[in-house]
Image (tube, rainbow, N blue to C red):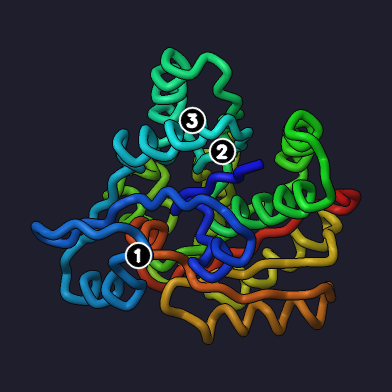
Amino acid sequence: MRILVDSGSDLTLQEIEQHNLDFLPMSVAIGDKSYKDQLEIDNQTVYEAIQQGRRPMTSQVSIDQLTELFTEIAGKGEQAIYYAFSSALSGTYQSAVMVKEQVTERFPDFDIEIIDSRSASRGLGMQILDIVSLRDQGMTKDEIVTQIHEMHEAIVHLFTVEDLAYLAKGGRLSKSQAVLGSLINIKPLLTVEEGQLVPVGKYRGRKKVFKEMAAQLKKDGHGAVINISHSNDETGARQLADLIAQECGGTIHIHELGPTIASHTGQGTIAMYYFKEGHS
């Protein structure tokens, strides 16, 4: 069974290859040049553009990419699951549904499940790696789809950014929401609800917002694995990881946001993802 992932998952090319996944890259444009995420552009190029005052712009997975991959899978008579980047943050999910309908006209038995993850970054990536595990255990597509819906209810996204106005300019947050972080040294805490970015609090200084993230982790209970992501701020990521290790325990993995996600958050983002207690 084929498992499809896009840039919204922040899985690395190494992970994609290791787990035998099909990758649908989004595009990042800087000036008049467009690059396929991870394949033709890396994080450092995105950071350098931001530092120079040039805003990288992103595009959803193209219709041509979707059509080519879907047609190949359908032509081979294979099953597939595509757990797509949140439809509230990208048009990729809607495009995939449209292309599925077109390909099904040619291949009526085309068997692909396209699911709106309502998730982003490693919050999506963690779920995909769980889907891989279920596939490797020999579960059927229908059994995995049932597990996916349960999995989605257990995932938590928490993150803080240096500049909410940067998110607002990219259209991923309203201007009124961005006012939350406009005061000096006020650090916002955001989450993902129904696929959308939602501010949930503001704290004076990074230490306090990190303390709140740890408190939320304790309150929810959590699984054995916690993922922390950052955009050009490994020091901050390690500070949060040290705090979580002291106060909550668990296995902590640190990753860097991919080019697409970093283009929207800007530099200095620190994010944490985990499953609530009870998720297996």
- Label 2, secondary structure: give it: strand
Residue 160 image offset from top left, x and y in percent: 52, 63
Disc 2 marks a residue whose amino acid type is Tyr
Instruction: Choose the circle earlier in sequence order: 2 or 1.
Output: 1
- Which residue is identified by label 1? 39
Residue visible at 75% across and 47% down in the picture: 135
Toward the viewer: 141 or 150? 141
Is residue 240 visible in the rendered image? The answer is: yes
Q: Residue at 42% across / 78% down in the picture?
A: 232
Residue 276's place in the image compared with 74, above or below, is below
Mark 3, residue position: 75
Reading the chain from its start, which is encountered first: label 3 or label 2? 3
Q: Secondary structure at mark 3?
A: helix
Q: In this picture, is 256 found above or below 175?
A: below
To which quarter of the image does residue 142 belong?
Answer: top right
User: Three-letter amino acid code at disc 3?
Assistant: Gly
- Is the Cβ of the residue at disc 3 closer than 8 Å to that at disc 2? no
Q: Which residue is mark 2?
A: 82
Occupied quadrant, residue 62: top left
Q: Quadrant of residue 159?
A: bottom right
Q: Which residue reaches farthest front?
A: 76
